[in-house]
Image: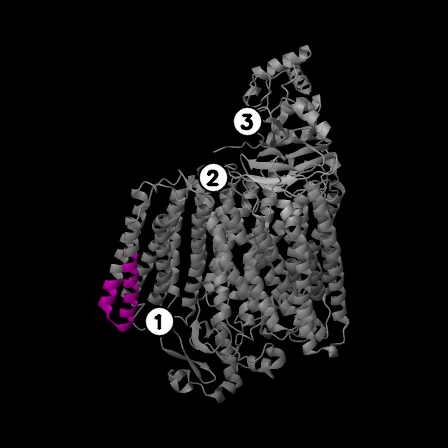
Amino acid sequence: MKPDDMDSEPSNLISEQDRDSAEYRRQSAERLLKAWETPRGWRYWSAVNNSEVGLWYTVASFCFFLFGGVLALLMRIQLAVPGNTFLTADQYNQIFTMHGSVMMFLFAVPIFEAFSIMVLPEMLGARDLPFPRLSAYGFYSFVIGGIFVCGSLFFDAAPKGGWFMYPPLTTSYQPGIGADIWLLGLTFIEIASIAAAIELIVGVLKCRPPGMRINLIPLYCWYILVVAGMILFAFPPLIAGDILLEMERAFDWPFFDPQRGGDPLLWQHLFWIFGHPEVYIVFLPSVALMAMMVPTFARTPMVGYSWVVLSAVGTGFLSFGLWVHHMFTTGLPGISIGIFSAASQAVAIPTGVQLFCFLATFTAGNVKRSVCLHFIFAGLATFIIGGLTGVMVAVAPFDFQAHDTFFIVGHLHYVLIGGTIFPIMAGFYYFFPLVKGKQLSERIGRIVFWLVLIGFNITFFPMHITGLLGMPRRVFTYPADIGFDTLNLISSLGSIILAAGFVLFLYDVVRPRRNQPLSERNPWKAGTLEWLAQMPDQPWGVRTIPIINSRYPLWEQPDFVRDVDEGRFYLPDAVEGRRETLVTTVIDAEPIQCLRVGGPTFLTFFAALFTGGFFIFATYHWWLAAILSGLIAIVVILTWVWTGTAEIPEKEMKDVGLGLSLPLYISGPSAVGWWAMFITMTADITAFVSLIFGYFFYWTIHDDFPPQPLPGPGVFWPVTGLVLVMIAYGLTLLSRRWNRAGYTSAFYLSLSLAAVFSLAGGCALLAGPWLTGLDPTQHVYPAIVWVLTGWTVLHVILGIIMQLYCLARRAAGKMTDRWDADIVNVSLYWHFLALTVVMTVGVIAGFPSVS
Amino acid sequence: MKVIEMPAASDAVKAKLICAGILISGCSGSQSALSPAGAGAEQIASLFWWMAGGATIIWVIMIALSIYTLHLNPDAHHRQKSALFIIGGGAIAPTIILTILLIYGLNLLPALLARPPAGTLQIEVQGYQWWWRVRYPNQSGEPIELANEIRLPRGEPVEFILSSKDVVHSFWIPSLGGKVDMIPGRTTHLTLHPTKTGRFRGACAEYCGASHAYMNFTVDVVEKAEYDEWLAQQSADRLAPRNEAAERGEELFLQTGCGACHTIRGTEADGTIGPDLTHIGSRNSLGADMFVNNRENLQNWIAHVSALKPGVKMPEFRALSDDEYQSLSKYLEQLK
């Protein structure tokens, strides 16, 4: 956009001279603060700003961490002596299941997302993430789901199938609601996790400050991009697995029942296709934290920036090719074991590169010591042990012995505590001033550090030996005379020291600090944007959105802090009293839009509450309540979308400062909404492909799949459905074009017709399995056909809702030929829907005749 | 749908009392992968020691390097040297080490996974919540069935044919070799090659429900002659009761319906739901290696089974008198 394109109203025209006056600076800062003001009183909870939501989210996931830690202590008490009766088998099994599930789903993944929501905008010099209300929705979903899942433990109803939930133990042999709580409660949380991942990806790609080209973005953001991308592809297979498992539990569809053509191994594949990337989803963000802290303490830019980025991306890719190493003992052929063994070792290489980059940075710089640095080094030393034992178990023959023993318990805690918790602790010390404006105590910190480090090693190192002496995992007790006693007792004593360290740390975090002076600004002398924050920080995120031309602007750009403070960059003001941030291009970060983001609202809370209601009621098989709650959730979400998105601005362009004028509204592939839809649908189609994977998995293991003669769904109805939906798809695309061309009645006609054809298409798709009488409880073939059809039809229904939404928006004047983001995004959805329908029909109607 | 009853709260309390009385025992020798007594376990143990040694050296080097970087004079930084350091230390060195390790490790794989030649002893083991059905081949017809106990001739390969009748289990004798899962609807194989005589302990390694911790078994590796003798003895029908109490016990066994689930060859009891008890008196332990096999424990088992082993399917026979318990346990004890 060139300055001479400017089209702003006279009242907004402020000369450069005016901008320099102290009076203007004061007034603009006031207006900006007013726009970004955090609501007070009970309305505080309607806040959606990233600093509030990020903080709540972080605190909540840290609370779940403490809860998971208490569970771990209970287990250690039980295992302290042989034949202990402190816990019953049933209690122990619930506790170890919950410990794993809580730490993975309610702590490790959420805390990274939470923390990223909090600091990402600061690192990017943005005011907020592009969809603040989505973050709030994700947060409330997380808390509701988390409390529901954890609460079950107090009613003796918790899941007890292990965090890996292997069927048939979890289908036919655990009749209580525990497994349903796990499946539905955690699916709900996984959806929240995906929502946060979408937010973070769009944030990194589209909300960078002008000039921050892709090779200048802070390393943390690179890792976020990689990890959020991994979530997008890793969580959907698990969600697909959850759907299959829950369908078997609730409706007896035999996906994992070998008697009726199912296979328990399908679950193991789906679970570990998620489960192994999950390890890196948990671990990489902590490396990201180190990648921010290491240059700061070395007082020098990261050595080998591009190597770090490449290895992070490489780790992300490789991590999807390792899942079978969790299944080495399932009787797979030697060739697959060999390949996955090699791939599992290969992942050590990018990890090694990252570590050596850190060491090279320390070599290059003048290292400043602190508790942070202690934790970083302890993290590295510990993680290297975990990595080395990881390489050991990747060698399949050794895994035949070590698999499912305490050796693995030791290994994984060295990886996760060394690789994840220690860097997070360092991160707490490092970033605490950003949140509270005050520092954690170095003196207490040193005691915490030694307690945690010593306690950790005493607890977990002996486990390697216990495992090799033959102690399997997940046993609630063990006999006295086979050599497990002493080592277990040592582990239990160590866990008390470890716990004492965390208690002391917790005290330091929550202790009152009224008398403690504020921290100085940028206490660690870091070079990245988040340290522009004042102490205490202001809610605006950043005073003015800067122009960036280096990786460490605070170190390398002269007078940078002064210019930001004096509002000399973009958007120093909020003339219209709206919350605004800049949208830039993906690669070069050229500003393309001034984005208005949503302000405080309770809608997100209610949306989460009723979405949660759907999952929670379904757990108890209260179908009516579940459906009602689900419908209310849809209405609330539609209200939120209706009132809060694609708002028609009062003017085309806005002066954002420095002589630049940007549009307030864009639609299509440059808009954040389009990206969010695209990314969401990528995750969605991944889940769908996982279901398709199920279909072909059965085909590979059974000679009679699909069965002959084919019981259904025939060719006619699926193909009819396909044709009808394709017509609807074409009409939807036409309606977008006609809308833009201003053919109003053609738009209405084509989109209404599209909705009718969609409905007919959905019915025809259902007619296939319905009219051929496929009974999903009888055999896995009808069951998987029904699941694919059901998934597709649900998406068609969603597509119809979107078509009706666009018709209503147009009728209400909220969408016009000029302001058409709604129909553009809906067409994008329909691209994916068309693909889904083609694949479904191709598989259920086409494949049987081909095979 | 099979339903497993979980012990109610009162059962939990009772379990504590009873367990405090009888000490759970692993009366069955080594469970250690580090004191190998089989060809596979020996190879894997030496693989482990090599890897552990190498890992220690690498770790010490890394720590030394880290400390060195902290104390290094910052002026020494040189761009090209850093690149060499990162690529050399982070990529090239690990690639070389891992390649060597991979060649060593994967070389073991074919031998560990290979099916043994025809004519090798094949033992069928089925996993159940929470016990093992063991079937030995028998030249003259029906396989010989026993439970929770395996005996192997030293120096000969043996192939286990593994399957599960309920949930996923994993069959593991650490001293003899690696583990292989038992998966419902599939059959898996594991070949072991015991090299030393002795008693070893096996365990279920895959979490399989409430009493996963109580799903173990004993393995006796003996010389061939002793093995043959033992197998011949196991293939015989039960020893007839030799005294009045035992006779009364057999009667009770049949009357109270034990035979609906248990087989005692040579009697009418031919149930197949629970373990075969034809030679229970000769076994090393009770309850899938929970307790020492003696009369007192047998009696406790019959009376308090669901408190002792949470979730187990066997009902408690609470209606019997003390006298009857004694007769039953005497009978079972003499089924050598």
Residue that appears at 47% across and 58% down: A137
- Secondary structure at badge 2 equals loop
As rendered, which of A797 and A793 lies closer to the eye?
A793
Q: Amino acid at mark 1?
A: Ile
- Secondary structure at badge 3 equals loop
Foreground tag (2 vs 1): 2
Identify the residue position indicated by label 1 in the image: A648
- Secondary structure at badge 1 equals loop
Identify the residue position indicated by label 3 in the image: B273
User: Residue A257: which disc?
Assistant: 2
Residue B291 image position (x, y, % from top left): 69, 29
Crowding around mark 3 (Cα neighbors within 10 Å: few <14, some 14 to 19, many 20+) is: some
As rendered, which of B90 and A130 lies closer to the eye?
B90
Crowding around mark 1 (Cα neighbors within 10 Å: few <14, some 14 to 19, many 20+) is: some
The chain to which mark 1 is attached is A
Check the image and report above or below for A444 versus A760: below
- Mark 1 and mark 3: span between their CA atoms? 72 Å
Q: Earlier in the sequence, mark 2 or mark 1?
A: 2
Left or right of A659 on screen, residue A449:
right
Do discs 2 and 3 share a chain? no
User: Can you tell which quarter of the image residue A77 is in?
Assistant: top right
Q: Amino acid at mark 2?
A: Asp
In magenta stretch: residue A743: yes
User: Residue B102: which disc?
Assistant: none
As rendered, which of B190 and A75 lies closer to the eye?
B190
Magenta stretch, main secondary structure, is helix
Q: Amino acid at mark 3?
A: Ile
Magenta range:
A724-750
Tell me whether circle 1 and circle 3 mark residues in contact (CB < 8 Å).
Answer: no
Left or right of A24 on screen, residue A677:
left
Check the image and report above or below for A125 versus A81: below
The chain to which mark 3 is attached is B
